[in-house]
Amino acid sequence: MRQGVIHLSEPIPAIKPAILICEAHEGLQEAFRLMLEDWASISFVAQAEPIFATLAQERPDLLILDMDGQAAEPMVLVERLRTAYPELKVLLVAGQFDYDFQVACVKLGQLSFLTKPFSAPAAVAKMKALLGLAVPSIRTRVVKIALS
């Protein structure tokens, strides 16, 4: 029996992960859009309170939460998110994280932090790692070669 080859006229579209970004600054919204638009489906909210209404309707694969400039108390916000959505992957972004805040977050299961300023390749690598996507190596290795 002869086996045939199946040809597809159009490529099968890849399913893009859904990422919800809580960011008030328009410049950073644009930066995130440029970093993510090719490989993720993205939506934005400016402040933390609408996150809960949005999460009730949508289930993003990742939430990127900029802690700077939020009206809500940061620890209360993280506690609410971890309690209501324990399986949600959350990347906290801030200019600086207090050590005690990070320890309290880790105890709640929040393990992902990104400190500003950050490079786009490092941020994308962290996001893809959180989503379980292939991450190209951004590390370099110095190799010494002895020439004779």
Image: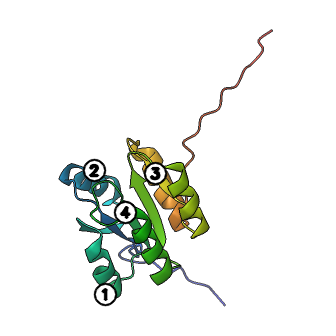
Q: Do the residues under discs 4 and 2 have CB atoms within 8 angstroms? A: no
> SS class of the residue under badge 3?
strand
Tag nearer the camera, 2 or 1: 1
Indicate the amino acid at tag 4: Leu
Q: Is residue 93 above or below residue 120?
A: below
**Is residue 54 placed above or below 117 in the rendered structure?**
below
- Which residue corresponds to the image point at 27% horizontal and 60% vertical from the top-left? 23
Under mark 3, the amino acid is Leu
State how far apart marks 3 and 2 are (Cα): 15 Å
For disc 1, the neighbor class at 10 Å (few under 14, some 14 to 19, many from 20) is: few
Is disc 4 surrounded by few (<14), some (14 to 19) or many (20+) residues within 10 Å?
Answer: many
User: Residue 31, labelled with which disc?
Assistant: 2
Between 32 and 9, the one nearer to me in the picture? 32
Q: What residue is pinned by disc 4?
A: 65
Q: Residue furthest right?
A: 148
The residue carrying mark 1 is 57
Residue 63 position by quadrant: bottom left
Q: Which mark is residue 114?
A: 3
Q: Marks 4 and 2, Cα distance to the nearest angstrom?
A: 14 Å
Kindly state the secondary structure of the residue where label 4 is placed. strand
Q: Residue at x 81, y 9 (%)?
A: 148
Question: Which mark lies nearer to you, 3 or 2?
Answer: 3
**Residue visible at 32% across and 65% down?**
21
Of the numbered discs 4 and 2, the one sitting upstream in the chain is 2
